[in-house]
Amino acid sequence: MQKIHVPVNDAYDVLVERGILQNCGELIKNTVSAGTCVIITDDNVDKLYSGTVEQSLKDNGFRTAKFVFPHGETSKNAGTLLQIWSFLCQNEITRSDCLIALGGGVVGDITGFAAATFLRGLPYIQIPTSLLAQVDSSVGGKTAIDLPEGKNLVGAFKQPAAVLCDPDTLSTLPEEFLIDGMGEVIKYGMIADAELFRNLCRYDLGNIREHLDEIIPVCISIKRDVVAEDELDTGRRMILNFGHTLGHAIEAYYHYETYTHGCAVAAGMCLMTKYCGSSEDYEILKQCAERYHLPSDVPVSIEKLTALCGNDKKRAGAKLRYILCQPIGTAEIRTVSLPEFRALFEKP
């Protein structure tokens, strides 16, 4: 078992081990003193892993309840959150109980926000089952829901009590979810680890599963270091948003139906590098993305995308922050006005 400690104010461990789901009840028992554990998951993950997690919890003395909602980004909204709150009330959940986010990034985000807000806060455990969630969204304590006006615009910082990563869950991932997660994996190489990026340029979609045991802890460790330095996202942590300013605009433009988050981020990284970075870095990044069947562009004008960036949560007053990786393996935060940001994309 690999243990990665996240030294924030409410410190916790990320545990990475194949088969950890079968033992999750004991690990959770050693982490929180809850009477009831509420599993929150989506209808895809429920069929695969809820039974294993629920049995392990019961074997370790927990009472359990389960809330299941339809999979997909379109469920990460205020309506689903209200249903979760009502479910917790109906099951008489108290602050001495615990929520468990079993699933991908959508499940983790909305469960964390429910944990941050219900009864003004109760503990929760992240059990990420997608590559994107294991390498990125389950760590760091950002929780949120989407609004029609933009992604992740309502949320809270709420660190989990623990994160339990089981790479075995990735064996059941359909290829499109593996592709989705690789968008965030490439991001980590771009912002902080040139060696990781070089390795990703050597691997491809056909053999990447063979390397995930080494890749997942590297990505988690990068995020751990950034989050420990800037827990509340007021400075250095913003480098984790490379590709996200345009990526979120892509998701919103297509109403969260056409491009998954990782694919939108990949296109956002490529477009940002194409217009604001060097042509050499752009070609290298584009070729790397294509090795994993990720998009490097989308069939909509850049003007329509930049028009949506005004609702980005990284905006500060009339200014917008964006990230540029030049050279690859480093990241710089730049701040410009909205007109200046849009002007960056006017060159041919």
Image (cartoon, rainbow, N blue to C red):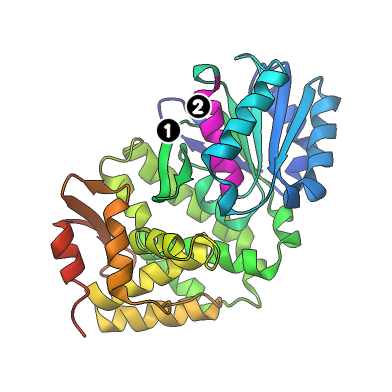
Choose top left, top right, bottom left or bottom right for residue 52. top right
Tell me: residue 210, above or below residue 48. Answer: below
**Residue 154 visible within the image:** yes
Q: Label 1: which residue?
A: 156
Residue 287: x %, y % from top left: 44, 82
Q: Is residue 311 magenta?
A: no
Residue at 52% x, 67% y is 259
Which of 264/201 is in front? Answer: 264
Q: Are marks 1 and 2 in contact (CB under 8 Å)?
A: yes
Residue 307: x %, y % from top left: 27, 64
Badge 1 marks a residue whose secondary structure is: strand
Residue at 53% x, 43% y is 77
- Image quarter where the N terminus lies is top right
**Residue at mark 1 to residue at mark 2: CA–CA distance:** 7 Å
Choose top left, top right, bottom left or bottom right for residue 268. bottom left
Of the numbered discs 1 and 2, the one sitting upstream in the chain is 2
Q: Label 2: which residue?
A: 116
Which of 26/83 is in front? Answer: 83
Residue bounds of the magenta highlight:
106-118
Mark 1: give few (<14), some (14-19) or many (20+) Cα within 10 Å.
many
**Amino acid under disc 2:** Ala
Magenta region's main secondary structure? helix
Q: Is residue 116 magenta?
A: yes
